Amino acid sequence: MSSKGVVQYYFAYRKRIQTYGGFAIIIAIALVTYLVWQTGGIKFVYSHSMYLPVLAAGLIFGLPGGVLFAALAGVALGPWMPIDTSTGELQEPVNWMYRTAYFVLIGGLSGLVNDSFIRYIEYLRWLGRHDLKTKLPNRKLLFEDIDALNSNGFRHRTRGNRCLLMVVSIDNVKQLQGAFGFRVIDQIIKVYSKLLQQHFGKTATLYRTDSNQIAVLKNSCAEDSYTAQKDVIVLLKSTVSFGSYAVYVSTHAGAITISSAHETPETYLQQAEIALAHAYATQQDCVRYSSAIELTAQRSITLLGDLQDALRAKHLTMHYQPKIDLKSNSVCGVEALIRWKHPMYGDIPPSDFIPQAEQSTLILQVTEYVISQVTQQIMDWKAQGVEVPVAINISSHDLMAKGFGAKLLAELERCEIAGKMIEIELTEGSLINDFTHTQIELLRLSKAKIIISVDDFGTGYSSLQYLHRLPISVIKIDRSFIRNLPNGNGGRYIVDAAVTLAKNMGIETLAEGVETPEANAYLRKIGCDSVQGFYYSEALPADKFVEWYRNYEPVAAH
Ligand code: C2E
Ligand code: MG
Ligand code: MG
């Protein structure tokens, strides 16, 4: 057994070692006493054998045990033991007292060595199981505690009892560290752990399972514990003080109820973290783990891998949805929308992979792909006599990427496509990311006559002040406001206001998701410039669009 193994064994079986060791030491003391008696008394060398059980006592029991057994050994070889058993001559008191003092010294010293060793090992064990900065237990201790529950707890639980494992994570770590340095996260974890402990009560143990993550293990809670605890994030919504600053912290939580010893502790924590990732992705405060969530998570990760392959193999196609000018009823453009037929999952809607791709740099590859497909399409259509501007959806990552505008312009030049044939659709959020950079980039594109529009207008963070300072030509009013037109006051008021406001600012309006003649008529009545939606056509493959375009009769149809 290695020295590490010996230490582990000692700590695991300390009580047992002390019980058996105690008996063994008493027997050893008795045996040495018998040996001294049998070999003729204390004047011979055999009395020194008593140091062995005395040393062992110190090593097994520490200082008090070492002293106690040493005193016992001193008494065993004490006044009653003759110097010479054949003559029966007894020892001088100073003789046996001196020997006992030696025993006590040796037993005490070995006990001290043992105590220091154990304290040191215990400190090392504590270090391995705690976070130094906050003194909170760490991931390793969480695993050990769940293991202990697995092996003891659940066996004694009455039916229906559960144990809740919740992980709470700080999302905006990079921003916080960038602004205030590394210590800010430790400070937030300290504040949050106090709040969480108060909230969950004494039956809960808190762990720092990652630099930005706290786990709560709540024992013996009722079956509906998750329902009772899922609002915990509300508690953490207040700002945290750091020096003289009030710091905004964004948090999400994931939870799992553990009711049996089916899984390993690592799996339970992983499942809680899957729920946490889902909460973050879907912008919910807290999500409870289910196998459906895990499947979705696995699928979205494997999808991103597949997406890369699909881009390389050109398995993604573009569909085109017409935009209609409401004054002339003519087709004033098309929007290019990406389509993916996955070999295993079939048609995958963009909403299932674009948001994920937008969280990584993969979106840059998607946009590059879309631009190359669209420019090729414009050239092909031109050859067929079809000339309509094509809108491309652009993400905030694209706009932030170095040289995005220059690359787009270079591609248009290479394909000899005029700027007015391209429109870029940006969401409100992407416009305010880095305003100065956005402004420079968009001015460069608008100078080349590229049309710039704001997609899904009304759903994001709209600052009219920003819009006013950017070269925006069109706002595309989100389809959620158009759906119930001309009924549904909420949506109608927003649409009315958006159209009026845009007109005053010299910006055109387009209504997305027009599905009915009533909505179409209403939009025309209030002066909306153009529309797009299933009422005219869904997004079509390129050849089908040409067919539709050639058959479209502006005046008669609408
Ligand atoms: P979006 O840019 O707002 O595109 C409009 C979405 O509304 C399209 O969904 C379109 O099919 C749908 N739509 C159009 N008319 C109607 C209607 O009358 N009723 C209803 N219910 N829906 C209508 P799609 O193609 O699923 O795209 C969803 C979103 O995915 C797009 O929203 C856009 O944000 C994103 N997207 C699509 N293609 C691309 C792309 O090539 N690049 C990027 N970055 N994003 C894309
Ligand atoms: Mg769009
Ligand atoms: Mg839209």
Image (cartoon, rainbow, N blue to C red):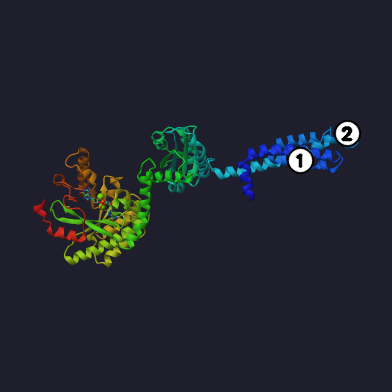
Q: Earlier in the sequence, mark 1 or mark 2?
A: 2
Q: Is mark 2 within 8 Å of ligand 1?
A: no
For label 1, count other residues whose C-alpha is less than 10 Å away and answer few (under 14), some (14-19) or many (20+).
Answer: many
Instruction: Identify the element where label 2 is drawn.
Output: loop
Percent position of residue 19, x then y: 66, 37
Task: Give the amino acid type for the residue marked by disc 1 in the picture.
Answer: Ile
Percent position of residue 146, x then y: 50, 40
Q: Is residue 170 visible?
A: no
Q: Is residue 109 visible?
A: yes
Which of the two marks, 1 or 2, is nearer to us in this view? 2
Q: How many marks?
A: 2
Q: Is residue 192 left or right of residue 482?
A: right
Instruction: Identify the element where label 1 is drawn.
Output: helix
Disc 1: which residue: 106
- Of 103 and 498, which appears nearest the observer? 103
Percent position of residue 198, x then y: 47, 32
Disc 2: which residue: 90
| Residue furthest out toward the left | 556
